[in-house]
Amino acid sequence: MVLELSIPEKNVPLEPHVPAGLAEVLSVLERVFGTELAVVDGETGAVVRSMQHPPGGGRWELWGVLCRQAAEHGRPEFLEDEDPVVVFAFPLGRSERSHFVAVGIFLCRPVGPGDNLAGAAALLGTTETEFRAWASRQVVWSPEALQRLGDLAVQYVDQMEQATRFEQEAQSLSAHLASTYEEISLLHRLTRNLKISRSDEELGRLVLDWLLEVLLAEAVAIQLLPVAEGRSNLSAPGRTQAVLLTAGQCPVDCAGFSRLIRYLNLGVPLQPVVLNRAITRRPDWPTPQIRQMILVALVEGENLFGWVAGFNHVDDGEFGTVEANLLSSIAAILGIHSGNLELYRQQSELLAGIVRALTSALDARDKYTCGHSERVAQIAVRLAQQLGCNARQQETIYLAGLLHDIGKIGVEDSVLRKPEKLTPEEYEHIKQHVRIGHRILQDLKKLDNVLPIILYHHEAWDGSGYPDQLPREEIPMGARIIAVADAFDAMSSDRPYRKGMPIEKIETILQAGAGRQWDPQVVEAFFQAKQDILEIVRRERQEIPSGWLVSPESAFGSAAVSPAT
Ligand SMILES: [Fe+2]
Ligand SMILES: [Fe+2]
């Protein structure tokens, strides 16, 4: 549900010195009293709205002083009385905000032709003739009725004032509710997206778009700092450079943002930092295009992962506690997410390290297969990237590449290292390595996704492989990828009975086997990524101690075809 709240337009002021709401009240009162009313400022005694058709000049200096008293008393008062007129005043509201007093000149009895009107005309500063003409147009009021109506008018204005106050309170409450709703909705969306599979950059981008809708800022940004780089940047890639994610018209780039942070020299602030014009107007402020800024650190425990910032208030106003609180809540959630990701990354790195140690022990049994697992893992990851697999799938494929032949631990050395052709029994024995590998690892929860790949990495696209003769798409994608990586590394490596094949020959075999031995899509990915794969093989073989290399100068020397194991 979307909560929509609107704020009514303000009344347009009718006179420069009389508040808009009051002008409305006055016009009502003038209709009720049947005469025009002047308005006096009850604090200064000055006339802020005069009458259009006064019977004379009037004694406004005296009446101003008396109006101040009426305002102070908060009740209607007769300012002067000279038969047949009275000057009557009543306060327009009794609050601290409203100190205006309405003043009217009222006729208290009908005027006859023989009446002496000299006193009344003098009071108002006019001639008898003019007074008589004015009196002929007036409604006649008894002083008692005036008093009663004055009391009612004061109450009426009080109620109007109260209603206006309530309306303003309702408006500000509505605005507050609307912004609170937006905040809660943003935080809700954010927490719903807190998955370990979502990278901090991905989550940051989502947050920025939402944040720009809510925060009254021209731009918002998240800077994510580098995380420690591990040996295994394939299983758990770490960011090596800071990145600045932005939304809106961001006034700085990543380097500029870093310079600003250095200039501010905040350390790791636990509270939001608000930089308004008082600071950004200083002559040494390094980024004049930033007029206002709000900054919160992304912290989890003792680790600083980055910053969340808002730049330049949209109305050129100032950022305050509302913005600071919102950014703090977001930064706290993002900080926890970054902390979790880092923990997960470290765990993955540890796991990959342990797996590498395990598989290099296996590879070390045979100098001909030295480095095979690591190469297969890296080639498979490159193929997976080519095929559009996501980071999590690539991580699984990397581990599966490392572990694909782990079951060979259970294969006799005499069979594993036999230089001659294997007997059918020996071949059956070596085929068991897929089941043995599956059995060894099946209790490791973290490797759940890796297990089917290990079990099926010797299945063939046409259903002629082992152990279950699965055809085509029934073979897990990861296993189809490992199969190509495994075959390529086996064919290109030296064996006791042959040297590594030349690349041209390997390509011919792969092309011939696409759609029979291997998934044609994976073979196609191999040809697309061929240069990178050759580079992986070259680099990884360089890392092997030279004594282990059988023929380093001819990694792709000529030899006979042999199946991958
Ligand atoms: Fe194998
Ligand atoms: Fe293998």
Image (cartoon, grey):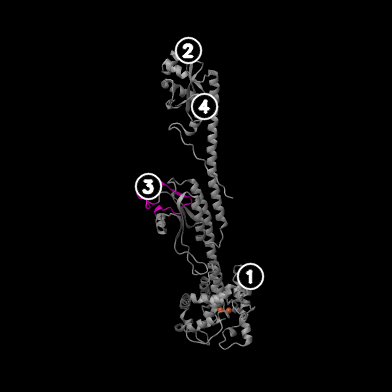
For the residues labelled 1 and 4, say whether their Cβ atoms are less than 8 Å apart.
Answer: no
287 left or right of 551?
left
Q: Nearer the viewer, mark 1 or mark 4?
A: 4
Task: Look at label 3 and name its amino acid.
Answer: Arg
Residue under numbered circle 1: 443
**Element assignment for label 1:** loop
Residue under numbered circle 4: 31
**Element assignment for label 4:** helix
For the residues labelled 2 and 3, say whether their Cβ atoms are less than 8 Å apart.
Answer: no
Q: Residue drawn 61% across and 73% down?
A: 452
Main secondary structure type of the part rendered in magenta: loop
Residue under numbered circle 2: 113
Residue under numbered circle 3: 281
Task: Look at label 4 and name its amino acid.
Answer: Arg
CA distance for labels 2 and 4: 28 Å
Badge number at residue 320:
none
Q: Position of residue 62 (x, y in %)?
A: 42, 20
**Element assignment for label 2:** loop
Of callouts 1 and 3, which one flags the residue occurring earlier in the amino acid sequence?
3
Q: Residues within 10 Å of mark 4 (few under 14, many from 20)?
A: few
Would you say residue 264 sits in the magenta stretch? yes
Q: Residues within 10 Å of mark 1 (few under 14, many from 20)?
A: few
CA distance for labels 2 and 1: 119 Å
Which corner quadrant of the image does residue 425 belong to?
Answer: bottom right
CA distance for labels 1 and 4: 91 Å
Q: Which residues are magenta?
A: 263-289
Of callouts 1 and 4, which one flags the residue occurring earlier in the amino acid sequence?
4
> Is residue 111 positioned above or below 449 on the image?
above
